[in-house]
Amino acid sequence: MRTPDHPLLIIPGPVEVRQEVLEAQTEWMIGHRSKEFVALFERLQHKLQQAFLTGGRVYILGASGSGFWEAGSRNCIREGKKALHLVSGAFSERWATVSRANGKEVDTIELEWGEAFATQMVADALQKERYDAVCMIHNETSTGIINPVREIGEVVKGYPETLFLVDVVSSFLGAELRVDEWGIDMALTSSQKALGLPPGIAFAAVSERVLARAEEVPNRGYYFDLLVLEKSAKKNNTPTTPPISLMFAGDMQLDAILEEGVENRWARHLSLRDQTIEWALSRGFGLFAPEGSRSPTVTAIANDREIDVEAMAAFMRGEGYAMDRGYGKLRGKTFRIAHMGDMQAETLEGVLASLDKFLAQGES
């Protein structure tokens, strides 16, 4: 809700959260070993399985999505074996760093920021070397690229010893994602993107293959040990104190999402993307992502007009919007418009109209 004290968040996370979802966090506190909590956990589990399109377990953890990066690296890569990381942006770079920080051997396929992976790249790598896991980002938030996870999953299926670990942080509930059908062994995400919740809680849909692999890996730590999480999840609980208030909010938000319909939510995000792309191209900007690889949840606009993105952000703040100015080494060269979560077309129309006002200032 845009107010004089609160600019509407048009950044790629945290996203704007509906007032009623924020208020759900004010439910009376319950003990996490109580029957009330067990019921809350069980409700969330059922709804999350529908959202991930999986019949497997979905873990709930008080963490950012990066916590499940560490869980994937620690639990899925055996001593003396390697992981293959697909790197083409800030967050895929960071996940590879996390694997190395946990003492794992890592090979990478590296592309320029703004390029999407092709299945043949992965097929060639798997023919040359055996890997315990292929790790990739579905939707690279820093560049506005969506990668062909379904097609790459088909390649990985041909290698039974290789697990397929996918970061779906900025694609979950904003882009098509079919965990079981696509052969994803671990799909990890967090709350503050297209799910439309405050930050601080993370989720991961995990296959039985991952749990079997974890049995072979010593020194998995504790907080991110998937076998510890599994033992508690069987009892509809968590091994450590969970973010109960965020779980109440998630319970409410998932009801709204399932009422909208997961596929309808995907379609709404695509429509918002196309609305953004049409605006950018008609105003003389380029698009950082190539056609066919443009994210449904965040558009990285190439700053071909060389506008002052700092001035743009300041102007938009005055209009009641918090805007992005580009990420990392792309700051100023691009700016990103996030169209994810519960954003509706009329909200995006207001954002684009205000951007037009800024552009008109520069032309006068």
Image (spheres, rainbow, N blue to C red):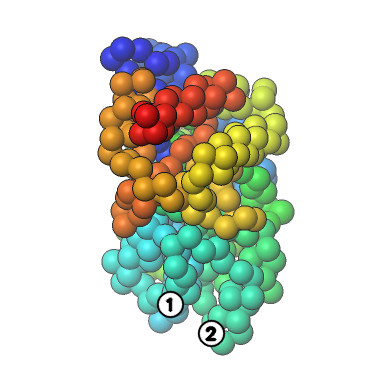
**Can residue 76 be seen at all in this image of the molecule?**
no
Q: What number of labels is visible?
A: 2
Q: Quadrant of the C terminus?
A: top left
Secondary element at image label 2: loop
Q: Is residue 324 left or right of residue 184?
A: left
Secondary element at image label 1: strand
Question: Nearest the camera: 231 or 276?
Answer: 276
**Label 1 neighbourhood size at 10 Å, few (<14), some (14-19), many (20+)?**
some
Alpha carbon distance from label 1 to label 2: 10 Å
**Residue denoted by label 2:** 129
**Residue denoted by label 1:** 107
**Can residue 324 be seen at all in this image of the molecule?**
yes
Residues marked 1 and 2 touching at CB (< 8 Å):
yes
Q: Which mark is residue 285?
A: none
- Disc 2 residue type (three-letter): Glu
> In percent of the image, x 44 and y 68: which residue is there?
112
> In percent of the image, x 56 and y 36: which residue is there?
279
Upstream in sequence: badge 1 or badge 2: 1
